[in-house]
Amino acid sequence: MIPVVFDDLYGHAYTDRAVKIDVHTTRDVLVSNADDMADSVAWKALEGELSKWARMLPKRTD
């Protein structure tokens, strides 16, 4: 799940593993369908959490 959500950090480093679990995000679709999404309190909270987790995750995939 982490390489999908944080694809800018990890890309597709784990695509050749034995167990395949698909994770999809609708982040871009939400922003494109709601003009005011990026300005909402809820969206800002979610983006803050995403940034927090991105800082806590290891920088290297290995």
Image (cartoon, rainbow, N blue to C red):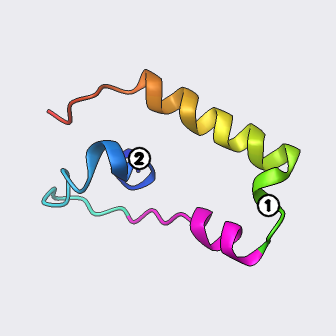
Q: Quadrant of the C terminus?
A: top left
- Name the side, left or right, on which 55 lies relative to 21: right
Circle 1 residue: 37
Residue in view at x 36 percent, y 62 percent: 21
Disc nearer the start of the sequence (1/2): 2
Furthest-bottom residue in view? 33
The correct choice, above or below, for 2 with respect to 33 in the image is: above
Q: What secondary structure is marked by label 1?
A: helix
Residue in view at x 18 percent, y 51 percent: 13
Please give the label number shown on residue 54.
none
Instruction: Tell me if mark 2 has few (under 14), some (14-19) or many (20+) residues whose alpha carbon lies within 10 angstroms of its own.
Output: some
- Name the side, left or right, on which 33 lies relative to 59: right
In this orientation, which residue lies closer to the viewer: 25 or 33?
33
**Residue 21 is one of the magenta-drawn residues:** no
Q: Position of residue 39 (x, y in %)?
A: 82, 52
Asked whether the residues under the numbered discs 1 and 2 touch, taking CB atoms below 8 Å apart as contact, a structural biologist would say: no
Identity, as a three-letter code, of the amino acid under mark 1: Met
Q: In this picture, which residue range is highlighted in magenta? A: 22-33
Q: CA distance from mark 1 to mark 2?
A: 20 Å
Q: Nearer the viewer, mark 1 or mark 2?
A: 1
**Residue 27 is one of the magenta-drawn residues:** yes
Q: Position of residue 26 (x, y in %)?
A: 59, 68
Residue in view at x 87 percent, y 44 percent: 41
Please give the label number shown on residue 6.
2
In this orientation, which residue lies closer to the viewer: 39 or 5?
39
Q: Position of residue 36 (x, y in %)?
A: 84, 63
Identity, as a three-letter code, of the amino acid under mark 2: Phe
